[in-house]
Amino acid sequence: MIVAKSQRRWLNLAGVALVAALMGYAFYAQYGPLRLEPCPLCSFQRGAMIALGVVFALAALSAPRGVSARIFAVLGALVAAIGLGISSWHVHIQNLPPEKVPACGPGLDYMMSAFPFQEMIQMVFTGSGECHDINWSFLGLSMPFWTGVWFVALGALIVAANWTRLTR
């Protein structure tokens, strides 16, 4: 049970640190020796993870009480749920049978510059062949699966840290 404002602040800072570590590994996997280029869905998952980190950071800076704290809890849970949805869809695309895998499409940078926003979103979520590839796994589970696990854990953390009432 969280009983003090300082505990709330530390839990939110722990969330920021976890998000920073996860994003650090994502950039290490991209620019380090693994050289894993993120597909469009991976990029969207990164965006959701960064947004969750921003919510954690704002909650840590303000260490809110009452309704303000619950707003951070709901906002963080919403961002985590969106990230989980993206991760789940990515895992679904990775597990499609080979004959149902969509063809490789243009890169996300090109789609963002050449298509209207709604069309670009639709293209990303209908998937592309590169999103089907599993080129990293841990314990037999792909990176989008593990990202989904982290969205669940971080969503639970932000709710636990910010939903409870503080004692005066």
Image (cartoon, rainbow, N blue to C red):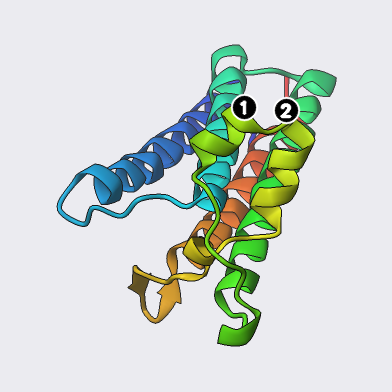
User: Which structural element holds mark 2?
Assistant: helix
Identify which amino acid the numbered label 2 is placed on: Phe
Check disc 2: other Cα within 10 Å, few if <14, some if 14-19, many if 20+. many
Seen in the image, is 114 located left or right of residue 35? right
User: Mark 1 sits on what residue?
Assistant: 55
Residue 86 vs 44, above or below: the answer is below
**Visible residue check, residue 1:** no
Q: Are marks 2 and 1 in contact (CB under 8 Å)?
A: yes
Of the numbered discs 2 and 1, the one sitting upstream in the chain is: 1
Locate the N terminus by quadrant.
top right
Check disc 1: other Cα within 10 Å, few if <14, some if 14-19, many if 20+. many
- Quadrant of residue 141 in the image? bottom left
Q: Residue furthest right?
A: 67
Residue 23 vs 102, above or below: the answer is above
Residue 135 x %, y %: 35, 69
User: Mark 2 sits on what residue?
Assistant: 72
